Image: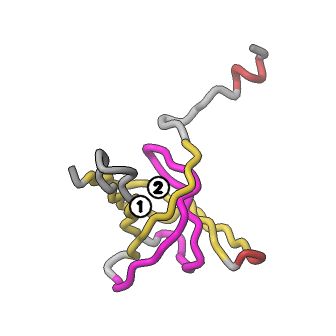
């Protein structure tokens, strides 16, 4: 291992996992449930892609569906901390910080 590889060691408290799953979300207490795609996930945050326009600081309740009968859906209260526009796809990418996780176990 080179010195550069050592200095680039994973510095996150939670490892980011690449995922590609449809999630649903609600913005604050406003009515309406929207869909998006979770592109990566860690214990501290997620990358959400959606055609719904959101703003920095928006609070979302994101539901990650169960992946089989032995699992339960996961609800996460998250906050938008980064916004990136993808004009060619008419979508947005959002960096979310997870503030609270609630498993419906």
* Element on which disc 1 rests: strand
Label 1 neighbourhood size at 10 Å, few (<14), some (14-19), many (20+)? Answer: many
Q: Which residues are magenta?
A: 30-57
Q: Magenta stretch: residue 32 in it?
A: yes
Q: In the shown orientation, is residue 1 left or right of residue 78?
A: right
Residue 41, given in percent of the width and then of the height, sits at 51, 49
At a point 38% along the width and 74% down the height, the residue shown is 26
Q: Is residue 103 magenta?
A: no
Q: Quadrant of the N terminus?
A: top right
Instruction: Place residue 7 in its image quadrant.
Output: top right
Nearest the eye: 1 or 105: 105
**What is the CA distance from the residue labelled 2 to the residue labelled 1?**
5 Å
Image point 50% across, 65% down: which residue?
80
Residue that label 1 marks: 78
Between 24 and 48, the one nearer to me in the picture: 24
Residue drawn at point x = 55 percent, y = 42 percent: 17
Q: Residue at x 52, y 36 (%)?
A: 15
Looking at the image, residue 66 lies above or below residue 88:
above
Q: Which is nearer the eye, 39 or 95?
A: 39
Q: Is residue 84 left or right of residue 13?
A: right
Residue at the outermost top position: 1
| Element on which disc 2 rests | strand
Q: Is residue 83 above or below residue 104?
A: below
* Image location of residue 38, percent across then percent down: 53, 59
Whether pointer 2 and pointer 1 mark residues with C-beta atoms closer than 8 Å, the reply is yes
Q: Which residue is mark 2?
A: 97
């Amino acid at each position: 291992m080179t010195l550069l590889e050592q200095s680039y060691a994973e510095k996150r408290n939670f490892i980011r996992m690449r995922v590609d799953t449809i999630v649903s979300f609600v913005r604050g207490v406003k009515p309406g449930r929207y869909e998006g795609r979770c592109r990566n996930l860690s214990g501290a945050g997620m990358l959400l892609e959606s055609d719904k326009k959101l703003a920095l600081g928006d609070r979302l309740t994101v539901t990650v569906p169960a992946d089989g009968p032995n699992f339960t859906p996961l609800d996460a209260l998250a906050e938008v901390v980064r916004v990136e526009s993808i004009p060619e796809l008419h979508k947005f990418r959002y960096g979310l910080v997870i503030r609270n996780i609630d498993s419906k176990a």
